[in-house]
Image: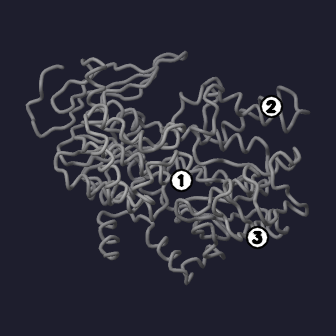
Amino acid sequence: MGQPNKDNDLVLDIAGLSIVSLHQHGAQPLLKGLTLRLRRGEILGLIGESGAGKSTLGLAALGYQRTGCKYDKGVVRFDNLLLHSGDEKTLSSLRGVRMAYVAQSAAAAFNPVHRLGAQITEAARCQAALSRREAERRMVSLFRRFDLPEPERFGDRFPHQASGGQLQRAMIVMAMLCEPQLIVFDEPTTALDVTTQIEVLATIKRNIRAHSATSALYITHDLAVVAQVADRIMVLKDGMLVEENDTKALLTKPQRPYTKELLSVYQVGRKRGGGKKKGRGVLLRGEGLDASYGDGARILEDVSFGVSEYEVLGVVGESGSGKSTLARVVTGLLPSREGSLWLGGEVLPRRLKRRSKEQLRRVQLVSQIPDTALNPRQKIGEALGRPLSYFFPQRTQAERERRLGELLSSCELDSRLTNAFPAELSGGQKQRVCIARALAAEPDIIVCDEITSALDRLIAKGIVNLMLELQEKLGMAYIFISHDLGLVRAISDDMMVMQGGKILSYGAASGIEKSEDAYTQKLLRSVPQMRVGWLDEVLQKRG
């Protein structure tokens, strides 16, 4: 498969790599002459905003290219093998065994009709020739290390029976099962709460350090996270290298303006209290809400809250705490078993089908996973045009088209994307389309379920600031669900901390540090800090 590289310590050697995207507007460069060298036992962080080329580079490291893309120049060598001159059979024999990939969206990656255990052990059994017993033994051992519930039986679950954070950890287990030489982590902690994120980061770090032959590319938009695991960091923008250095030097002495900009985005906030327009009463109220799936145990238990116009109610908690279930109850996707909802002065029906068109318009949802929220066969223009046509049939076609352009512009999306399919967009772009779709209804309240989880810090800051500006202008309220406790605390009027479907703390965000609840204090201590060694200090304090 090509001439071997003389440096036997190199696991991955990428030289002058250029990749272009082919579509109706012509060839667009995705990577522009990138060079990368990864040694055994090393963790290299790739950081940059959405569309920087991070995931494209990570996939290229596995000898894979997306549909509609082609290699223009350069070479990719893995363990002395020239990947892009090999046949697909040879590449398939490497993937899942000697090299592995952890995707950003675990919910979209797992097959919903097969049990998790069968999917996790498939590559080990088929390509690494492990017996079923040995593959399952390794799987259960990793389940324990990742603190997954009922490790001996967790593999019997279907994907829908696990939370988003549990699915993400299960995908990392699948990648680690055969102890590969190279693992590409593509935003592996994006969907995780801060406490679970610490455990996953610690497990990743320990695994790489314990197996000196294993190396990793760690792709993320969060510098505070990558600082805890990476030996070196490469900063990318528009498919080009901006800056590269060891982690401590890059964080403390960045050389390039763009790197400095990335470091500066960890401060975001708003003027609490909604300014002069606050005080028009409670817009949405919930009292004594209980909910469950099927005949199972309660996921929400006696949850009560209220949010007024121009206010932000922040909801935080670990994976499985009931945050997303609360979002589904408020939007009518999951009828509550007990309790009541009021929108303004009227009772809000529990079931979505029983709500009037006006009630549907007034309460909108932006979901956590844009990959599953957007129809893959529907163009972006159609996705945004449907709520405009449904909620505002009196508007002319010209008015709708003008509004469509305003929505795209407000969410920092190119107008040409109206003819694109979701698969042609980056993760951040897809999430912004979901936000624009909610805004199209001109709602009174938007339930934001992890809306920034798929966005890099620069774009997330812009989106949050945009939504806060729209709130001040239009009077919308937000229920802002997130595992980013620092962000929630900065932008919320009130905060609600949940665990096990119950409310542990509820009050003014400005005073959350004074909470006497032990779990709330644990969350506050788990927010990643922008310095090398923070993770080790936290783990050491835990003993």
Expressed as whole percent of the image width and height from the top left, the position of residue 428 reads 53, 41
The quadrant of the image that shows the C terminus is: bottom left
Q: Which residue is mark 2?
A: 400
Q: Is residue 281 above or below residue 12?
A: below
> In the image, which disc is placed on residue 288?
3
Asked whether, in this view, residue 299 is left or right of residue 146, the answer is right
Mark before the other along the chain sequence, 3 or 1: 1
Expressed as whole percent of the image width and height from the top left, the position of residue 54 reads 39, 38
Closer mark to the observer between disc 2 and disc 1: 1
Asked whether, in this view, residue 267 is left or right of residue 133, the answer is right
Callout 3 amino acid: Gly
Q: Which residue is mark 1?
A: 163
Callout 2 amino acid: Arg
Mark before the other along the chain sequence, 2 or 3: 3
Q: Secondary structure at mark 3?
A: strand
Callout 1 amino acid: Ser
- At x 65%, y 26%, the residue is 379
